[in-house]
């Protein structure tokens, strides 16, 4: 098993042009898109459709009239949407279907659409993802770090490094080794690292420190979300 890491958005832009048919992509947007999706799935959501634009979200709701619209732009709920992108908003049992668009997370998920399998990764379901990958034993894994805007996001790379650490017999590319080194530096206090990250600081300044603490919890849920034909469902 070879583990690679896609560390930043400019690399994610190149994924649709790559042959990913024998690659399992695990997408991390720890603060907060994939953490919110995992939280929703853990609370009973049956399907999440990640979309790229606000217009696409409204158009998709024509096809899924019972779906709620969630997501963010500049960290805030989008006008006309039902929910924002705080994982706390997804801790409810009545959200059967969700259509979501976020600045980076949904872009990264969609960029992986050509992969053998696309798994929604978070610290929240880390052990479940590890165990699922162990059962699959894929030839190649790409740990896709959604980032922030055009930049690498520390928290996504830490999650990628943690997962690579949990699969010790895999061969790591240099990018994956880099993620592991960063994870090992911060492993003793992931919550502090998330709070010190650029995204974490912005969230704390905006009174959303609770979101950071939520997303920093490791293996709180055992749910696995897999995207097929553009829709994320539990397996
Ligand atoms: C994103 O997709 O860029 C993030 O999840 C942003 C956020 O939650 O504020």
Image (cartoon, rainbow, N blue to C red):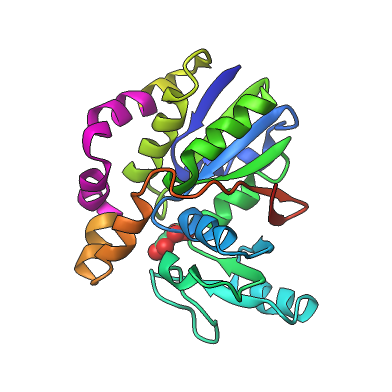
Using residue 214 as the reference point, say whether residue 127 is left or right of it: right
Give x and y (percent) for residue 109: 60, 50
Give x and y (percent) for residue 199: 30, 56
Instruction: Residue at 40% x, 20% y: name it.
Output: 177
Q: Is 191 in the magenta?
A: yes
Res. 90 in view: yes
Give x and y (percent) for residue 11: 51, 38
User: Most extreme residue toward the bottom, as rendered?
Assistant: 80
Q: Nearer the viewer, residue 165 or 203?
A: 165
- The kind of secondary structure the magenta stretch mainly shows is helix
Res. 146 in view: no
Q: Is residue 89 above or below residue 185?
A: below
Q: Is residue 109 above or below residue 162?
A: below
Q: Is residue 105 above or below residue 205?
A: above
Q: Nearer the viewer, residue 37 or 50?
A: 37
Instruction: Residue at 51% x, 12% y: name it.
Output: 169
Please provide the residue range marked out in magenta: 179-199
Q: Nearer the viewer, residue 208 or 128?
A: 128
Which image quarter: residue 32?
Answer: bottom left
Query: Which part of the image, by quadrant, shows the N terminus?
Result: top right
How many numbered circles are shown?
0
Instruction: Residue at 22% x, 58% y: name it.
Output: 201
Instruction: Residue at 55% x, 37% y: name it.
Output: 129
Q: Nearer the viewer, residue 212 or 172?
A: 212
Q: Is 166 in the magenta?
A: no
View quadrant of ligand 1: bottom left
Using residue 95 as the reference point, say whether residue 214 is left or right of it: left
Give x and y (percent) for residue 5: 49, 30
């Amino acid at each position: 098993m070879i583990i690679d890491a896609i560390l930043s958005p400019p690399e994610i832009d190149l994924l649709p042009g790559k042959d990913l048919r024998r690659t399992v992509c695990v997408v991390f947007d720890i603060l907060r898109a994939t953490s919110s999706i995992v939280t929703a799935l853990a609370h009973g959501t049956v399907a999440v459709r990640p979309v790229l634009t606000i217009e696409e979200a409204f158009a998709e709701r024509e096809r899924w009239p019972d779906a709620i619209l969630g997501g963010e732009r500049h960290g805030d709920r989008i006008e006309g949407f039902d929910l924002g992108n705080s994982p706390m908003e997804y801790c409810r049992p009545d959200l059967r279907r969700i259509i979501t668009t976020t600045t980076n997370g949904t872009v990264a998920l969609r960029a992986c659409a050509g992969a053998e399998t696309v798994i929604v990764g978070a610290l929240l379901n880390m052990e479940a993802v590890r165990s699922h990958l162990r059962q699959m034993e894929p030839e190649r894994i790409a740990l896709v770090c959604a980032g922030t805007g055009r930049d690498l996001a520390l928290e996504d790379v830490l999650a990628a490094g943690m997962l690579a650490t949990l699969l010790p017999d895999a061969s790591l590319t240099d990018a994956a080794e880099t993620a592991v080194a960063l994870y090992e530096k911060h492993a003793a206090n992931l919550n502090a690292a998330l709070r010190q990250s650029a995204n974490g600081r912005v969230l704390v300044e905006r009174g959303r420190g609770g979101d950071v603490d939520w997303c920093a919890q490791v293996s709180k849920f055992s749910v696995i979300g897999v995207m097929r034909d553009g829709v994320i469902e539990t397996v």
